[in-house]
Structures are given as structure tokens and as C-alpha cells.
Image (cartoon, coloured by chain):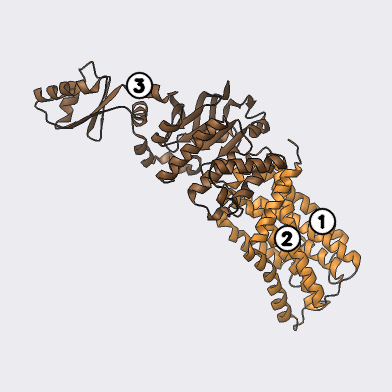
């Protein structure tokens, strides 16, 4: 057995793809929900003046929405390991002569692919809406951020899935951890103007993702340089994927 | 040749011992069954033998490969049908098989051929493109058996293969199990708490209770060990009758349960008049009496002191503490 069994990785990836394409409701909501946020928040807050806002609110909001869409989607894939646990399919995978690393890699790639697909759709919609992109390099850098966000969130999802026995705790984590972190990440409003919020943001992993994506994509209103953000996000990503693999490896069925 | 060999295999969950020091071996081409009530340690044994759980102590080997040191060789050689369905319900039956084949690195041409073969074996050719979520319980089970056979494993593990299925489907599944044992020379290790299933399918069975193997032998030997015939009777004043009958040397064993007295004897037909005579002398009235050949039920009763059903209904406080470890 090889550590990286390409066939096994492919199977895991393909399975995610089929699930995603076949689950029409997931396909629709995953695109509609961020658009709701974009349009409703965007048009609602566009008219009010926000301290610290340097660009049109819609432009400011766009990177935040992309981050949110990728985060939710990837996390869902990580957590979907729980489904496999509950429906017993995980056992079938674990008795197969393939390494656990292959299973994790396949799943992570699958989750990242679907998340990026959604991210790109929103990116295109934003472009159509006329959000001014900073530069070609900026867009490439933004794509790098999107990939990193996707992998980080899959890793985080894996941690949750390995630690939880069922779905009871899922809404709790969503409402008490993810949503507050997202609100404090500058995804929806600038945090730079208030020093306490800014200090909190520095302890928030989502902040570096949103800030980096914003810096790359529109080149305005970012607190840190995208280069600094990306370095931090890479570290977070490695930690999350590492922990996710570790816990997944350790979990018994 | 021994395909499965275990040596003092033990698994503990905290202070609860689910599998306690069991040693047994299964020969090539055999259908071997673990018979025991829920919570006896059957599933835990299967999980250890299929590399899903590490043993606390002891060792085991499958087709000559150690289950701890050579996990991947073991995995390559086994097929498993779990107690709970382990299918991807969002995929079609054929896709489930195809994914399985890919995970076991079966080349493309062979894959197609095997999928056709195993689907035919379990009569699911017409349903191969239907999503598994639209399958009935019996169809899912059949698909799982087919999947377990995809990579032509040396040994197939079946954990309660007919749990919760109707009588007709169960019979069909038994046929498939026999067929594959014969046609593919697959060694089969199954667990069950159904007496009729063990009786019908297994060449040899081990009776397992509280994590220990109580006895292990061929089904016919086990039945003769109980006695050639069983006489069951009910009467007035049962206590006196028992006291008197206990003195008779031709009664091998005597069990009183639910107001029915069971006697283990030879040549049961000839003993009925004797018993009636004894009863009349004590002026005890016999209400009913019958003689029959022993079943596995009787074997189980004789070795554990209770019937398998009565055991399933009873929950001891310890089982409540770790419900998820007690799946048999």
C-alpha cells in the first residue's frame, strides 16, 4: 500500500463531486445564500456611512461574502464525515486497503473543489456587478487565498467531525463559534476604526482570510498587507489540516 | 489450513471486557458462526479481525497475516458486511460496487466483469442503476454481500447478515451465502443471534456469551452433546416431581423453566410411559408431555442456562453505561 494511493484519492474526490452535483438543494442554497447576503446587506447598508469605510460598501462586502461561502461549504464537507459515520459508510472505507492519508487527501480535495466552484461563481457575479478588481496579480493572489480558505475549513470540519458523535452539536458550533468569528472578521464591516474590535480581530483566524482576500481583490480597506495575511493563513491552514488528519486518524468507528 | 486464527484475543472498553480471552480457528472453505445474544462480544470480535479495532491483548491472523502488524495485507484479503448498512445511499448500486473495486485496485476490465458477476449472484442486475436510497432493506443487504465479494476475498465477514429482514428475504440471503461459499470457495465467518440461521448455514459454531466462547463444535455434535431427545412436560406439583425424577439415572439433565420441565434423555419415546408411571405413583397429574429432537436453542440453553431470547430482553445496568460498545 502506498501512502498516496491516487486511485483511492480519486474515488474519494469523485464521490464528493457526485454528491455535490446530485444534491440540487445544496447546489442552489450554496449559491443563493451568499447572494442574499450580498444583495440584502449590500443594498441595506450601502446608504449609511460607516466609520473606516474607504470604498463603496458593496465592494467592501464582496470579499467577505466569498470567504463566507467558501468557509461554509468546505466546513460542510469536513463535517460530512459525520454522515458517513452515522450511515456506516466510513467503516467500508476504513476496512479497504488504502491509507488514511489518501482518504483525507481525497476528501479534502473534493471539499475544496466544490467550495472553490461556489467561490468562483460569486466572484464572477461580483465582477458582473462592477466591483473593480485591483490587478491581475491581485486576482491570482485572491485565488490563492480562496484555495487556502477552503483547505483550512475542510480541516476544521474534520476536527469537528472526529470529535462529535452526531449532529446535535453542529448548530451550537455554527452559532456560537463560526458566526461570531465571522462577524468579528471584518467580513461585514470594517474593524479598523475601533481599537478593541481590532485587537480581537488579530486573534481571529477568519480576519486574516477576509483581510487578505480584500487586499488582493480590491486592494483597499485592508488592514495588513496581503503578503503578511497569506503567510499567517498558510500557517493556520497547515495547523488545521494537520489537526484534522490527526483526529481523523485517531477516531475509531 | 487455518484461515482465521486467534490467540487469547481480548478487548476491553474502560473496565468492561467485551471480548475475553478467546482462541479459535476457522478452516479454509468453512462457514463458521458465532452464536450469542446481543452484547456477547460478536461485533467487537469482527471489528478486531477486520482491523477496525485494536485488541487490548492477544493476537490473531487472517490468511497468515497478523491483524496488528500487517493490517493492509489483512484488509486486502477480507470482505466485510457490517451489521448496520455501510452503503453510500446517494450513489447507485453499480457505483457503490465500482467505488469499492477502485479502492481495492481492481483493473478496469476485471472491474466490469466482477460487477456483472456479483450483481448476478444476488439478482440485482435490474436495479444496478437505481440510487441505493430507493432500495429495500433486503436489496441493500444483498448489495452489501455482493460488494463484500467484489474483490474475491479469501474470507468474508458477515455481522448479523439477516438482522431485521423478513422471513422470505432471510431465506434468499441464506441461499446467496451458501452459493458463494460453494462457487467462490469463500471462507465465511458470520455472527448471529438467530438459532435457525446458525443451524442452517454453519458447518461449525462457537457459542459466545459475555465475551467468552462457551463451546465450539459442529452443529450436529453440539446437538448430540445435549442428549438425543428432549422431553418437555408440565404437571401439577412440579416440585415433588422434580425431586423424584432427579433420582433417575437415565435422565442426563433436568431443567425447569417457565413451568415447563425439560429432560435430556436417550430414546425419548420409551421414557414417556415411565415418567407417567412415576407421576401417578406420586398422584401428580401430567398436564402435557412431548418429545422432540434437540435444537440449537436447547444447546444454547444447556450451555448458558437460559434461552437466547430471554437474554436479549434483559438489560443489565452495565449495558446501559456503554451502549455503543455492546452491539454483540
Give the residue number, with chain letter if any, for mark 2.
Answer: A115
Q: Within 10 Å of the Cα at label 1, are there few (<14), some (14-19), or many (20+) other Cα atoms?
A: some
Would residue A190 appear left or right of A77 to someone viewing this image? right
Would residue B325 appear left or right of A188 to someone viewing this image? left
For marks 2 and 1, give the CA distance: 21 Å
Residue pictured at 83% horizontal, 62% vertical: A143
Which comes before the other along the chain, label 2 or label 1? 2
Residue pictured at 22% horizontal, 23% vertical: B269
The chain coloured orange carries which letter? A
Would residue A111 appear left or right of B256 to someone viewing this image? right
Q: Are marks 3 and 2 on the same chain?
A: no
Which is nearer the eye, B31 or B85?
A: B31
Can you tell which of label 3 and label 1 is closer to the viewer? 3
Can you tell which of label 3 and label 2 is closer to the viewer? 3
- Residue A232's disc is 1
- Callout 2: chain: A
The answer to whether residue A204 of the structure is visible from this angle is no
Q: Within 10 Å of the Cα at label 2, are there few (<14), some (14-19), or many (20+) other Cα atoms?
A: many
- Callout 3: chain: B
Q: Position of residue A134 (x, y in %)?
A: 89, 70
Q: Which residue is most to the top?
A: B249
Q: Dividing the picture into quarters, in which one does residue B57 lie?
A: top right
Q: Which residue is most to the bottom?
A: A47
Which is nearer the eye, A238 or A180?
A: A238
Is disc 1 placed on a helix, strand or loop?
Answer: helix
Q: Dividing the picture into quarters, in which one does residue B116 lie?
A: top right
- Residue B94's disc is none
Q: Are marks 3 and 1 on the same chain?
A: no
Q: Is residue B161 above or below residue A206?
A: above
Q: Position of residue A17 (x, y in %)?
A: 70, 56
- Residue B224's disc is 3
* Quadrant in which the N terminus of chain B is drawn: top right
Amino acid at each position: 500500500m502506498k501512502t498516496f494511493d491516487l486511485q483511492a484519492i480519486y474515488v474519494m474526490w469523485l464521490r464528493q463531486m457526485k454528491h455535490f452535483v446530485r444534491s440540487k438543494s445544496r447546489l442552489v442554497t450554496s449559491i443563493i445564500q451568499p447572494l442574499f447576503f450580498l444583495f440584502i446587506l449590500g443594498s441595506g447598508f450601502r446608504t449609511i456611512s460607516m466609520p473606516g469605510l474607504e470604498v463603496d460598501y458593496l465592494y467592501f462586502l464582496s470579499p467577505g461574502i466569498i470567504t463566507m461561502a467558501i468557509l461554509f461549504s468546505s466546513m460542510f464537507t469536513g463535517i460530512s464525515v459525520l454522515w458517513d459515520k452515522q450511515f456506516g459508510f466510513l467503516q467500508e472505507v476504513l476496512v479497504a486497503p488504502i491509507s488514511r492519508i489518501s482518504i483525507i487527501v481525497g476528501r479534502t480535495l473534493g471539499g475544496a473543489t466544490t467550495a472553490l466552484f461556489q467561490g468562483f461563481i460569486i466572484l464572477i457575479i461580483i465582477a458582473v456587478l462592477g466591483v473593480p478588481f485591483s490587478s491581475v496579480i491581485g486576482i491570482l493572489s485572491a485565488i490563492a487565498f480562496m484555495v487556502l480558505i477552503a483547505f483550512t475549513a475542510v480541516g476544521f470540519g474534520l476536527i469537528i467531525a472526529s470529535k462529535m458523535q452526531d449532529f446535535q452539536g453542529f448548530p451550537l458550533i455554527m452559532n456560537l463559534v463560526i458566526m461570531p468569528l465571522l462577524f468579528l472578521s471584518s467580513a461585514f464591516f470594517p474593524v479598523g476604526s475601533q481599537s478593541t474590535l481590532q485587537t480581537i480581530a488579530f486573534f481571529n483566524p477568519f480576519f486574516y482570510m477576509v483581510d487578505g482576500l480584500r487586499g488582493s481583490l480590491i486592494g483597499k480597506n485592508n488592514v495588513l498587507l496581503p503578503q503578511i495575511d497569506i503567510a499567517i493563513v498558510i500557517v493556520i491552514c497547515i495547523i488545521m489540516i494537520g489537526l484534522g488528519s490527526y483526529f481523523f486518524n485517531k477516531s475509531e468507528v | 489450513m487455518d484461515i482465521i486464527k486467534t490467540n487469547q484475543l481480548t478487548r476491553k472498553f474502560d473496565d468492561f471486557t467485551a471480548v475475553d480471552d478467546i482462541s479459535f480457528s476457522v478452516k479454509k472453505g468453512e462457514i463458521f458462526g458465532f452464536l450469542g445474544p446481543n452484547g456477547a462480544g460478536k461485533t467487537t470480535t469482527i471489528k478486531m479481525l477486520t482491523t477496525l479495532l485494536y485488541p487490548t491483548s492477544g493476537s490473531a491472523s487472517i490468511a497468515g497475516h497478523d491483524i496488528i502488524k500487517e493490517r493492509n495485507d489483512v484488509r486486502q484479503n477480507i470482505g466485510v458486511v457490517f451489521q448496520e448498512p455501510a452503503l453510500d445511499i446517494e450513489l447507485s448500486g453499480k457505483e457503490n460496487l465500482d467505488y469499492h473495486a477502485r479502492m481495492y485496485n481492481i483493473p478496469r476490465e476485471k472491474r466490469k466483469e466482477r460487477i456483472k458477476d456479483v450483481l448476478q449472484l444476488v439478482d440485482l442486475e435490474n436495479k444496478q442503476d437505481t440510487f441505493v436510497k430507493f432500495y429495500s432493506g433486503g436489496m441493500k443487504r444483498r448489495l452489501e454481500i455482493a460488494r463484500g465479494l467484489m474483490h474475491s476475498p479469501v474470507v468474508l465477514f458477515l455481522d448479523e447478515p439477516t438482522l431485521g429482514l423478513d422471513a422470505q428475504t432471510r431465506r434468499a440471503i441464506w441461499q446467496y451465502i451458501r452459493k458463494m461459499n460453494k462457487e467462490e470457495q469463500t471462507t465465511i465467518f458470520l455472527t448471529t443471534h438467530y438459532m435457525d440461521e446458525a443451524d442452517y448455514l454453519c458447518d461449525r459454531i462457537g457459542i459466545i456469551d459475555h465475551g467468552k466462547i462457551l463451546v465450539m463444535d459442529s452443529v450436529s455434535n453440539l446437538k448430540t452433546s445435549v442428549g438425543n431427545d428432549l422431553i418437555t412436560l408440565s404437571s401439577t406439583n412440579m416440585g415433588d416431581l422434580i425431586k423424584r425424577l432427579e433420582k433417575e439415572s437415565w435422565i442426563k439433565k433436568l431443567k425447569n423453566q417457565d413451568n415447563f420441565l425439560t429432560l435430556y434423555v436417550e430414546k425419548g419415546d420409551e421414557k414417556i410411559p415411565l415418567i407417567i408411571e412415576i407421576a401417578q405413583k406420586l398422584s401428580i397429574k401430567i398436564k402435557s408431555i412431548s418429545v422432540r429432537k434437540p435444537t440449537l436453542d436447547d444447546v444454547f440453553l444447556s450451555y448458558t442456562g437460559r434461552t437466547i431470547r430471554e437474554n436479549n430482553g434483559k438489560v443489565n445496568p452495565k449495558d446501559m453505561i456503554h451502549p455503543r460498545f455492546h452491539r454483540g
